[in-house]
Image (tube, rainbow, N blue to C red):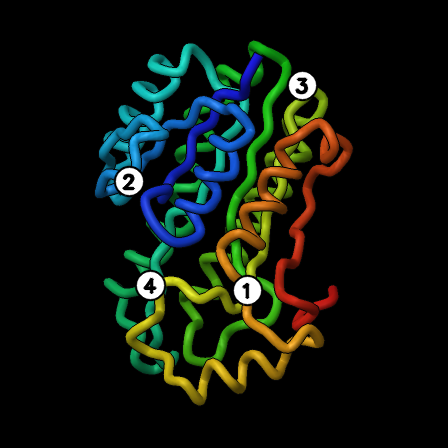
Amino acid sequence: MSQRVIVTGGSGGIGAAIVERFVADGAAVAVLDRRAPAGESASFFPVDLLDPLDTRRAVGEAIAALGGIDVLVNCAGIFQHASLLDITVDDWDRVLDINARATLVTMQAVAPVMLEARQGSIVNIASMAAKHGGGGEGHYAASKAAVVALTRAGAQEWGCHGITVNAVCPGYVLTDMGADTRSEADIAAWSAKSPLGRLGIPEDVAGVTHFLASPAGGYLTGQAINVTGGMIMH
């Protein structure tokens, strides 16, 4: 039986690559996002992740359409560059609500179904910022550290029911998010931080995400896997 997969933020960037990877493996995929994905390989459920009730509604509709759920991938997120002194309360709330609170809400929404089935895999897309970030992105780094903490909590609480929960921590991946704040000089400087001498591509993250949700990754749980080209090694 093919996997039934929900991907939040699956309409572009890393999320779209994750959707494509699962579809290529024969999975039935539902995308939860503000805008529809470009292709027709996945079903689409519009959602406002700032609204917990709407988030639960969309997850419930996706599960019903798929006939259950085997995998949840939380990929939706936002980035904002700001110094600590410039972060407003509204900035903090928006970044934390979308990146961290929505992750909690979707995990809560799928868990009862996975617990009843006594199987399932959750993969939360965090960031290298969870381990190394902070300067110029304090609220973003805090939100992604919260995602890693939620991942560990889910792994500890639900592992005895056959559910794995892992996080992926990408490094610099060239997507539309953050495009307005980077320059060619930034790209060259970031590439030099990797022993491999390059930045990541969405497919790098998609491959690890798919592995964690596959039988081959079945003995991994509570992990925060670096996909950073060696920029972070802990």
Q: CA distance from mark 4 to mark 2?
A: 15 Å
Q: CA distance from mark 3 to mark 4?
A: 38 Å
| Crowd class of label 1 (few under 14; some 14 to 19; many from 20; radius 10 Å) | many
In percent of the image, x 39 and y 54: which residue is there?
13
Q: Please report whichever mark, 2 or 1, sits nearer to the chain's N-terminal start.
A: 2
Q: Please report whichever mark, 3 or 4, sits nearer to the chain's N-terminal start.
A: 3
Quadrant of the image for the C terminus? bottom right
Front residue (pair 144, 3): 3
Labelled pair 4, 1 in contact (Cβ < 8 Å): no
Labelled pair 2, 1 in contact (Cβ < 8 Å): no
Q: Identify the amino acid type marked 4.
A: Asp
Q: Identify the amino acid type marked 1.
A: Gly
Name the residue carrying label 4. 176
Q: Identify the amino acid type marked 3.
A: His
Front residue (pair 113, 88): 113
Q: Which label number is shown at residue 161?
A: 3
Q: Please report whichever mark, 4 or 1, sits nearer to the chain's N-terminal start.
A: 4
In percent of the image, x 45 and y 39: which residue is there?
20
Q: Relative to 135, does residue 173 appear above or below in the rendering? A: above
Name the residue carrying label 1. 200
Secondary structure state at the residue bearing disc 1: loop
Looking at this rendering, what residue extends furthest in the bottom direction?
185
- Left or right of residue 26: residue 95: left
Q: Which label number is shown at residue 37?
A: 2
Q: CA distance from mark 4 to mark 1?
A: 13 Å
